[in-house]
Amino acid sequence: MPTGSLTAPPAVLTQWQVRPAASPKDIEQLCRDLQIPPLLASILWSRGLGTEAVRHLNPPLALTQIPDLDAAAERLELALKNKKRILIHGDYDADGITGTAVLCLGLRALGGNVIPFIPDRLKDGYGIHPDRVEEHISRADLFLTVDCGITNLEEIKALQAAGVEVIVSDHHQPGTEKPQCLIVHPKMSPLAKQGLPELTGAGVAYHLLWALHKRLGLEEPKEYSDIATIGTIADVAPLLGENRALINEGLSRLADSKWPGLRAAVSQSRLDGLPTARDVAFILAPRLNAAGRLGEADKGLELLMTPSERRARELAVYLDTRNNERRKIQDEMFELALTKCDPDAPALILDDPNWHPGVMGIVASNILERYYKPVFIIAQGKGSVRSTPGISAVKGLTYAAQHLKRFGGHSQAAGFAIKDDKIEAFKAAILDYVGQHPSPVRSLIADAVVSAAQIDDDLYKAIQSLEPFGEGHPSPLLALTDKLDMARAVGQTKTTLQLRISGIKGVAWRKGDMAEQFSPGETVSAVVSLRENTWNGQTNLEFIAEDLKQAEPLITEGSSVPQRFFRGHTKSAEVLRLEQLPLAADLLIATHDLSKIVEATPEIYFDLKPLYLHELETQLAQYPQLGEVRKSFVFISRGQALPFSPEKSSLIMQILEELELLKHGRALRGQKRNPYSSETLIKGLLEHYKLQTFINAYKYFDDASFDQTVANLFG
């Protein structure tokens, strides 16, 4: 029997892990190339970017290498020349709407006779509806899909049989058979074969327009990049490589867009300054998606395409209102869906004829977040799937295909159409499919471990330099272990947990019920991201906690059992016991002797007393950080003494001289330098990284993770 509860969600075990620290040798060049501190370079390395980080994070905006892109552009050029009627069939989500707008606006600007068509989510569903084919035949000479079409084999055959030329531009998973027409699809590109991030529907549309411009001898159509950026981010595309290049251009244009609709949307959303990827994902894109979810995707398309400032403002207000209505419908449906959930089932397959099909995907996502198992929601003949890693949504639908009218999607999200009399058989097939997989376990991966002393403005500014963040390139998650000052539930519904850990303020959303689990003064571990919070004119650095628990040893990915490096006391004569680290007096080569010992010694036991660890942490403060170097330049410019120890001040002066910002003790203003070109700064930062990471591992890791960290740092 379903036992879901509105107030007592099931406890879902979350396994924490920390990415292993990178070797200083591996990240030195990364620090120089990206001008970031070793901690962030280690995070990028451990995420798998490595030597390709620069290409992924600072890519040039270049025309994609998708096969048949130029051939499709050639067909469009011919259609323009011969005044053919071009029907652009998009999708009702933000990716499909923006991609349709890009090509519609772009082709019309070139003199094209272009007709946009966005299906009604509630009546037509996803893709080319068979009942619409005759209508399309009567209106089109060239039929171009955006963000759909790759699985519409029969519909495309019917269009072609009637003499309509078809081009499919899509990015969804192709079936075993593909349409017999020109296909512009990122999965067919060389980059996809290398496992690199792929363009979304809007991204493909942008590059198709670009390829056409190139054929016509025109400049790249960058003025359309802000429209395509909204679709790219809304579709949760990895913000790396080609996608990143596109959104970097688009975000830079969004605040002062050429398009009245985008300007009105930004204004209506009350966004200050340059919109970020997060602003697009959580503020702008949901308004476009709300229109599609409620069966009015045409309103979203009109907003993007209208030349009228007045109409743009009207539509922006209207879509804002509809988005609020969408939230209300979604919240009510979510509460009811929870009462139907069986926490013991391998998958949650929920149906109700009175539910709104337009918000099924969001509700499915929210239920998955709570129960962490695949969720299938069915309403009025349509279905939406959200799944966990390792259990493919689209493969599950393929397994149950005999019970479906049609389906499509990706591994984590998909959609389908189904007749009411097939629902029970469909449920049985899905439960059988999911039952063939291990039960999913929610995991939380922290990118690094930090002490409270490491969380400062320098670190936050360095993190900001790696924006935009999003899917595939999230803001760093840091594991913080320290004394809890305060934990209390706040807000009207007491669902927000307000925290202070070692003097640093933070919040944990939707975790207010955890407040009674913690007591001030106890040591806790939290996985956090950093943010700036402005209140009453004051801006402070705070954190957002993804999870919180009583402190226990942290575990790194890939660690098993300790092999060579241990903590504690031993009497064995066959191993080396270190009560203090053999550190050189010279800060820039402090760990040189330790590295030699680590390389040469089969087993080492580290038995470091709290007082010695405190001395090490005090020594860490002697390494100049980038912010301190910048402040010192200001002090020197004003003729003021440096407020640091003689040893630290000497290193800072050496760094400024290497950067040619100091001559005969005088600051040279008006110069712009890459601070990471200073050998002294780089060496100091790397030594600091090694010692700080070692201390954190000694204090907070389990034995196997400590062993792995020492090997990575000094081996």
Image (cartoon, grey):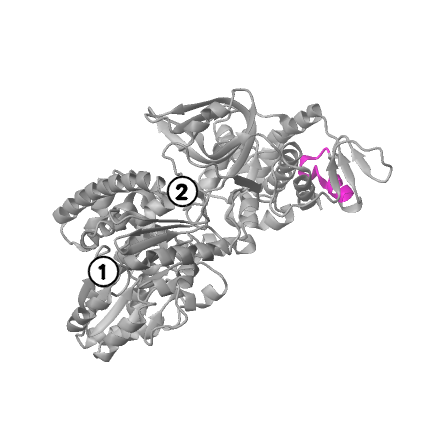
Look at label 2 and name its amino acid.
Met
Label 1: which residue? Answer: 124
Residue stretch rendered in magenta on the structure:
585-598
Query: Depth check: 40 or 90 in front?
Result: 90
* Residue 666 in magenta stretch: no
In the picture shown, does residue 472 fall above or below 669?
A: below
Residue 240, percent from left and from top = 44, 54
Report the predominant secondary structure element of the magenta stretch: helix
Disc 1 from disc 2: Cα separation: 34 Å
- What's the residue at 72%, 26% (across, down)? 609
Helix, strand or loop at mark 1: loop
Look at label 1 and name its amino acid.
Asp
* Residue 592 in magenta stretch: yes
State left or right for residue 514 relative to residue 160.
Answer: right
State left or right for residue 710 relative to residue 334.
Answer: right
Say which quadrant the N terminus sits in: top left
- What's the residue at 45%, 47% (across, down)? 345
Label 2: which residue? Answer: 1
**Mark number displayed over residue 115:** none
Residue 600, percent from left and from top = 79, 46
- What's the residue at 73%, 29% (across, down)? 608
Query: Depth check: 265 or 520 in front?
Result: 520
